[in-house]
Amino acid sequence: MNFIWLSFECSYRKKSKVKRVADEIRHGAVSRIVQAQFAIALLLTLSSCQSPTQSSNGLKLGTLLPITGDLAQYGSPMQDSARLLVKTVNNCGGVLGQPVELISEDDQTEPAAGASAMTKLAEVDRVAGVVGGASSAVSSAAVDIAVRNQVTQISPASTSPVFTERAKNGDFQGFWFRTAPPDTFQGQALAKLAKDQGFQTVAILTINNDYGNGLVTSFIPAFEALGGKVVSGQPTRYPPDAATFESEVGAAFSSNPDAVLLIAYPETGSLILKSAYQQGLLNKKTKVLATDGLKDAAIANLVGKNQAGKFIANGLIGTAASAGGPAIVAFRQLYNAEYKRQPSVYDPNTWDATALMVLAAESAKAATGSALKDKIREVASAPGQEVTDICQALELVRQGKDVNYQGASGTLELDAQGDVVGSYDIWTIQENGELAVKGQLSVGGS
């Protein structure tokens, strides 16, 4: 109600001032000098009467997620996770005594669109923090804009090792974090899985972007250290905007390796698997090993069925960062109650990224990007009372107590580069087309 009254009052004052000056000038009641003085006074009046959002000290956050494009299957549920966190927080008092505002932008799974959206969020909407992107390529295009505007960015899914190296170089000035572990670790997990499956030779078919290239860089030395061999020496790469994959698929399978490591997203990955099936390359000696980019509950339906009516993707096996933090059970229950479905692969990470933002703002007693980045690690790490419930955590912070927030995706221990370390699920597609987790692999970093 106060926001509504302030908006009305400002509007009334502006219109009254404009009308009075205009009437006096129109009737020749003032000289040119006095007209100029009136104009200056008018500008001061207008500039001092800001919009409610600009004049409030409430926390304003943005999301930069792929609602359309190759990662749309992930982006919409991730957006729902951020929205649910904000709704939950606002129902238990908000942040700094005010509701949290969430502004959402679609990065379209395209770096250019992501950069444009981040510019809007940072320079027009003036958000303090941004949750996103999902694609590493999008985050790479957006993060420098965030840093330049002192906006804290937490990605729930951008896993390229490039961010770790850039953070070590000081490029991000502390404004970059992520709640999904980097592909430095997933490469190790994939190598372990390949070895455990008895794969001695592996060919690589990968999307040619930061995500794919980062995984390739980490997988090859890890697999070779375990005695494996990457055939052909170099991976087969395809452009992110490719629509057909016959030649790339043929090249990857041509040497009859034990497995092809497929680094892809659901839209293009499903087309690649269809192409491999149509070329008669599946269900023979060569198996398909996948990454987290294909861990989608709908992947079997996207790929389709064979002539016998069985799912082509049956038996697909891969890795993805585990979402097994202390708060996972409560998060799943809350998410299912709100949306009548189970959360997807990076939904817990999105919930946690948003949770860290609100806890940092409450702890800092300020809603700026600089305040957020200075408090993120503090609310996520010891010392402090371990707490999984976001409302309880906020209440403890309001009481001046230290908290060690334990998330849905993990314990959220963040290193100097803003990275978390976690374990990896081994997932597979069953005969009925459903995605199932069949085990875990633990990897570590320094």
Image (cartoon, grey):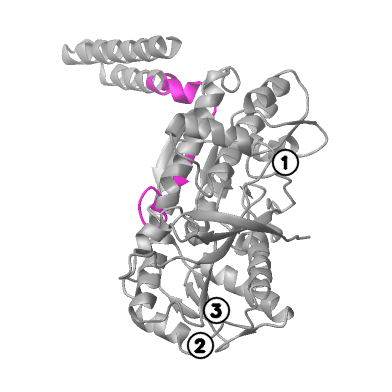
Q: Which of marks 2 and 1 is in front?
A: 2
Would you say 220 lies left or right of 13 here?
right
Please name the residue shown 66% across and 50% down the image: 173
Tell me whether the residue at label 3 lies in contact with that at label 1, contact meaning CB atoms closer than 8 angstroms: no
Q: Position of residue 133 (x, y in %)?
A: 50, 50
Q: How crowded is mark 2: few (under 14 residues within 10 Å), some or many (20 or more)?
A: some
Would you say 130 lies left or right of 340 here?
right
**Residue 419 falls within the magenta-colored stretch:** no
Q: How crowded is mark 1: few (under 14 residues within 10 Å), some or many (20 or more)?
A: many
Q: Number of marks in the image? A: 3
Q: Position of residue 322 (x, y in %)?
A: 63, 52
> Image quarter for residue 13?
top left
- Residue 187 lies, with reference to residue 104, above or below; the image says below
Q: What element carries label 1?
A: helix
Tell me whether the residue at label 2 lies in contact with that at label 1, contact meaning CB atoms closer than 8 angstroms: no
Would you say 343 lies left or right of 201 here?
left
Residue designated by label 2:
256
